[in-house]
């Protein structure tokens, strides 16, 4: 039985959340100050999440039997449970975004097809490596959101921010799971690093195209007085900073592990703020598994 070379956080809780009703009245440009670009970027990220997360779950599930009985069994179950709830809640948000005119259905469909093709043409281990690489992206953005006021500020609408904060907390909680499964089943460093190069192109390229298509369908984006300041603000935001790119590139280092970036205290603080005694999201949680 293979064993993981690095410990994984043992306690990955599956919180049964429901944001559906609160998201039903989110306005079209929900980001801070009605910002166009930030609204479209958040909408496009939400649009790729559910099918992306289904793919992550499939990729990890194929190796579930190989880590059964090891210290990874419980984290894998937690990972699968958390991603399933993320997918469900983001689909609810995507339905609202679609009503508002965002091309979320199209993006969902293309994401689903693209990832089904990846399943077909790539080996299970490469798909697992791709999942570990994508999880590094989500964890990097998640920890940035939790750490940086300036990033949270961009979201504007508290209901949308709440959805992304909960998702970010759980992405950071389970950030090492797919990576540890990949290592435990004998995935090589060489393949891991090569797959990340493909992910850099696929993820950044895919999101950029999605945002451009989304903006092209928005009449407000044709008003330069709104679009230009919005683009400038976005380019100066923490999302496009050198710090983020450095954190993403860390993954290419030989011997890298997701827990090298210690977020234990950050996560403890957010767990308390969102789900502690007076947690701001406690009333959105139907239960914990
Ligand atoms: Fe997720
Ligand atoms: Fe994840």
Image (cartoon, helix red, strand yellow):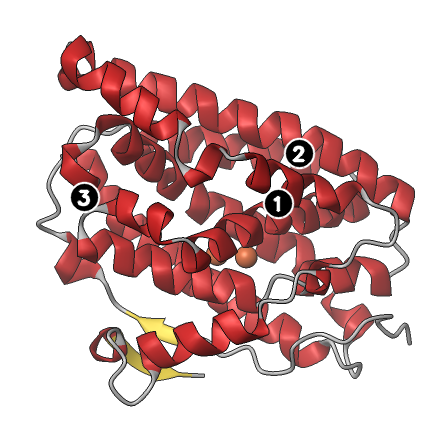
SS class, disc 2: helix
Instruction: Estimate the x, y position of residue 143 in percent, counting from the top left.
Output: 51, 57
Q: Is residue 131 left or right of residue 287?
A: right
Eye-nearest disc, 3 or 1: 1
Question: What residue would you read off at disc 3?
Answer: 96
Q: Is residue 62 visible?
A: no
Eyeballing the image, is 49 above or below 10? above
Residue 227 found in image quarter = top left
SS class, disc 3: helix
How packed is label 2: few (under 14 Cα within 10 Å), some, or many (20 or more)? some
Q: Is residue 12 visible?
A: yes
Does any atom of ligand 2 lie closer than 8 Å to the CB of label 1? yes
Instruction: Estimate the x, y position of residue 54 in percent, counting from the top left.
Output: 52, 51
The structure residue drawn at horizontal position 71% and vertical position 29%, both measured from the top left corner, is 198
SS class, disc 1: helix
Q: Which mark is residue 134?
A: 1
Eyeballing the image, is 58 above or below 95? below
How packed is label 3: few (under 14 Cα within 10 Å), some, or many (20 or more)? many
- C-alpha distance separating marks 3 and 2: 29 Å
Question: What residue would you read off at disc 2?
Answer: 199
Eyeballing the image, is 119 above or below 55? above
Report the image quarter containing ligand 2.
bottom right
- State if disc 1 and disc 2 touch (CB < 8 Å): yes
Q: Earlier in the sequence, mark 3 or mark 1?
A: 3
The structure residue drawn at horizontal position 37% and vertical position 24%, both measured from the top left corner, is 211
- C-alpha distance separating marks 3 and 1: 25 Å
The structure residue drawn at horizontal position 45% and vertical position 38%, both measured from the top left corner, is 239
Instruction: Estimate the x, y position of residue 179 in percent, counting from the top left.
Output: 73, 58
The structure residue drawn at horizontal position 57% and vertical position 48%, both measured from the top left corner, is 55
Q: Earlier in the sequence, mark 2 or mark 1?
A: 1
Instruction: Estimate the x, y position of residue 159 in percent, counting from the top left.
Output: 19, 57
Eye-nearest disc, 3 or 2: 2
């Amino acid at each position: 039985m293979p064993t993981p070379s690095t410990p994984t956080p043992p306690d990955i809780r599956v919180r049964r959340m429901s944001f559906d009703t609160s998201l039903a009245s989110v306005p079209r440009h929900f980001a801070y100050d009605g910002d166009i670009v930030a609204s479209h970027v958040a909408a496009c990220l939400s649009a790729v999440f559910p099918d992306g997360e289904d793919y992550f779950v499939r990729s990890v599930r194929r190796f579930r039997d190989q880590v059964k009985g090891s210290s990874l069994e419980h984290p894998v179950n937690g990972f699968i449970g958390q991603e399933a709830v993320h997918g469900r809640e983001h689909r609810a948000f995507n339905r609202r975004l679609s009503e508002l005119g965002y091309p979320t259905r199209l993006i969902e469909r293309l994401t689903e097809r693209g990832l089904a093709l990846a399943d077909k043409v790539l080996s299970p281990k490469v798909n697992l490596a791709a999942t570990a690489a994508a999880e590094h992206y989500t964890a990097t953005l998640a920890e940035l959101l939790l750490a940086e006021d300036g990033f949270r500020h961009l979201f504007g609408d508290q209901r949308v921010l709440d959805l992304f904060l909960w998702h970010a907390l759980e992405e950071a909680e389970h950030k090492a799971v797919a990576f540890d499964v990949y290592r435990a089943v004998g995935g090589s460093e060489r393949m891991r690093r090569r797959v990340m190069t493909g992910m850099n192109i696929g993820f950044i390229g895919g999101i950029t195209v999605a945002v451009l298509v989304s903006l092209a369908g928005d009449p407000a984006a044709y008003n330069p007085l709104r679009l230009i300041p919005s683009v400038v603000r976005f380019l100066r935001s923490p999302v496009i900073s050198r710090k983020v790119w450095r954190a993403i590139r860390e993954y290419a280092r030989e011997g890298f592990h997701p827990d090298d970036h210690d977020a234990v205290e950050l996560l403890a603080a957010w767990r308390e703020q969102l789900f502690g005694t007076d947690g701001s999201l406690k009333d959105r949680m139907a239960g914990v598994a």
